[in-house]
Image (cartoon, coloured by chain):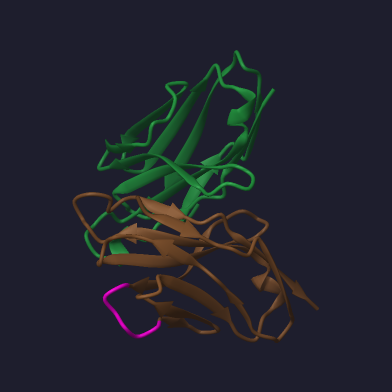
Chain colours: A green, B brown
């Protein structure tokens, strides 16, 4: 596998379920991101991790819980979601340095989440 | 807070022709970076082109070029010799140049859906 991978690609869950989204990057990057992409809305940054420490949390509801056990893996744990949480969840990574190139973000293919 | 506006929800272009996608942004910063990302139907978002605000020269990448007008806060993308594979959603994005406050956050526009007509 190369680049940024995400599993599963599609997920359907009920509001009482607990599930997790997984992201893995094979690029040796230090920063990883979770974005939410809803129809007709700009991409919304949810969380940023740099060297496994959370550096940004953009007022995301607590029913979304991120985890970054190491610089290659990022999880998004989901519980008691709402139908309005249905969206495409994108993971990205970047080298994490100070230059433009260091902060170029490489995206995964996304997980299409449907909450019933 | 910075905002990015893409005023064209959808555009179409004839194959081999040229199309320009518009993007405007609002910021009080003087140092920042601008990007165009492409998201084909397969959904993998990829970087098309980047521009540093301190550079006056417009960035080019093969058939893709930008028209960066800093005073007007405009950052349009020109695609020359359009190909069927160019059909995708195109997102304009802004990143602060302040490495302490906001170096990680990309602010995206809503996107423009480009169709290429054979």
Position of residue A87 measured from the top left corner of the image (x, y, whole percent): 61, 37
Looking at the image, the residue that sits furthest to the top is: A16
Residue shown at 34%/66% (left/top)? B33
Q: Is A116 located above or below residue A21 in the figure?
A: above
Report the magenta residues as a range: B53-58
Position of residue B81 measured from the top left corner of the image (x, y, whole percent): 65, 86
Query: Where is the C terminus of chain A found, in terms of image quarters?
Result: top right
Which of the 4 quarters of the picture holds residue B35?
bottom left
Which of the 4 quarters of the picture holds residue A101?
bottom left
Which of the 4 quarters of the picture holds residue A110?
top right
Q: Is B93 located above or below residue B80 in the figure?
A: above
The tally of labels here is 0
Is-magenta flag for residue B99?
A: no
Main SS category, magenta section: loop
Position of residue B110 measured from the top left corner of the image (x, y, whole percent): 56, 54
Looking at the image, the residue that sits furthest to the right is: B118
Residue shown at 25%/67% (left/top)? B30
Looking at the image, the residue that sits furthest to the left is: B100
The front one of B116 and B31 is B31
Q: Is residue B38 left or right of residue A32?
A: right
Q: Is residue A115 left or right of residue B27?
A: right
Q: Is A7 located above or below residue B109 in the figure?
A: above
Residue shown at 50%/52% (left/top)? A1
Position of residue A17 measured from the top left corner of the image (x, y, whole percent): 59, 16
Q: Is residue A15 left or right of residue B2?
A: right
Is-magenta flag for residue B56?
A: yes
């Amino acid at each position: 596998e190369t680049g940024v991978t995400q599993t599963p690609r599609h997920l359907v869950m009920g509001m009482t379920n607990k599930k997790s989204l997984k992201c893995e990057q094979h690029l040796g990057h230090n920063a990883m991101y979770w974005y939410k992409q809803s129809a007709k809305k700009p991409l919304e940054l949810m969380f940023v991790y740099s060297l496994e420490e959370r550096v940004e949390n953009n007022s995301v509801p607590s029913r979304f819980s991120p985890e970054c056990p190491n610089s290659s893996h990022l999880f998004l744990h989901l519980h008691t979601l709402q139908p309005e949480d249905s969206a495409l969840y994108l993971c990205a990574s970047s080298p994490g340095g100070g230059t433009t190139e260091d902060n170029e973000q490489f995206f995964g293919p996304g997980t299409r989440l449907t909450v019933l | 807070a910075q905002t990015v506006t893409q005023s064209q929800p959808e555009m179409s272009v004839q194959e081999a022709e040229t199309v320009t996608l518009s993007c405007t942004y609002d910021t009080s910063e003087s140092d920042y970076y601008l990007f165009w990302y492409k998201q084909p139907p397969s959904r993998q978002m990829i970087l098309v082109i980047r521009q540093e605000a301190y550079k006056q020269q417009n960035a080019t990448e093969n058939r893709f070029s930008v028209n960066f007008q800093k005073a007007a806060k405009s950052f349009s993308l020109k695609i020359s010799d359009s190909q069927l594979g160019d059909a995708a959603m195109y997102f304009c994005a802004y990143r602060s140049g302040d490495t302490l406050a906001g170096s990680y956050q990309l602010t995206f526009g809503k996107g423009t859906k480009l169709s290429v007509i054979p």
